[in-house]
Image (cartoon, rainbow, N blue to C red):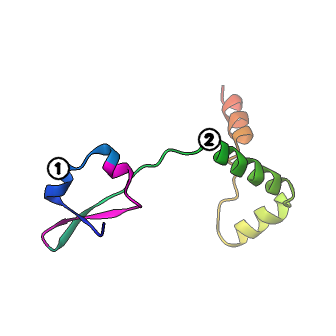
């Protein structure tokens, strides 16, 4: 489906929206007036595998070198890991 018309949008079901292959333009005549983006449920096993892999890769990184490279590019090198945020919240209590 290349696009959905405003009239079609009124008739489409939630299941049909979820089955869209990705972002779909919503048109009124020839003019695009919106974008319909279906939300897909995450596969918890796949998400857990990706997060475990990211954590394993992160353990091999040189934190000081990463922070220096980020600072050199003008990027805030703040550690936003779950543990760091929890520690910061506990300090403020």
Q: Is residue 72 magenta?
A: no
Q: Is residue 79 visible?
A: no
Give the crowd class for mark 1: few <14, some 14-19, many >=20 residues within 10 Å. Answer: few
Residue toward you, 18 or 29: 18
Q: Position of residue 18 (x, y in %)?
A: 38, 49
Mark 2 or mark 1: name the one nearer the start of the chain: 1
Write down the region rendered in magenta.
16-29
Q: Is residue 26 magenta?
A: yes
**Horizontal and vertical percent for residue 62?**
86, 61
Give left or right: position of 16 versus 75: left
- The image shows residue 59 at horizontal and vertical percentages of 85, 53
**Rendered-image quadrant of the N terminus:** bottom left
Say which residue appears at 69% left-offset and 36% top-offset: 88
State the residue in front, 10 or 62.
Answer: 10
Asked if 83 appears above or below 90 in the picture, the reply is below
Relative to 28, say whether 12 is above or below.
above
Q: Secondary structure at mark 1?
A: helix
Name the residue that disc number 2 marks. 44
Specify the quadrant that holds the C terminus: top right
Residue lying at 70% horizontally and 51% vertically, measured from the top left: 50
Q: Which residue is mark 1?
A: 10
* The quadrant where residue 89 appears: top right
Q: Residue 57 got which mark?
A: none
- Left or right of residue 7: residue 68: right
Of residues 83 and 36, which is closer to you in this image? 36
Q: Is residue 67 visible?
A: yes
Please state if 74 lies on the left or on the right of 26 as rendered.
right
Residue shown at the point (26%, 67%) measured from the top left: 3
Q: Label 2, label 1: how many angstroms apart (C-alpha)?
A: 32 Å
Q: Position of residue 70 (x, y in %)?
A: 71, 66
SS label for mark 2: helix
């Amino acid at each position: 489906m290349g696009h959905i018309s405003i009239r079609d949008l009124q008739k489409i079901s939630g299941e049909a929206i979820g089955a869209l292959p990705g972002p779909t333009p919503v048109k009124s005549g020839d003019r695009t007036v919106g974008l319909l983006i279906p939300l897909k449920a995450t596969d918890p096993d796949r998400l857990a595998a990706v997060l475990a892999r990211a954590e394993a890769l992160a353990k091999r990184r040189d934190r000081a070198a990463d922070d220096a490279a980020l600072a050199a590019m003008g990027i805030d090198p703040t550690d936003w890991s779950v543990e760091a945020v929890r520690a910061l919240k506990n300090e403020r209590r």
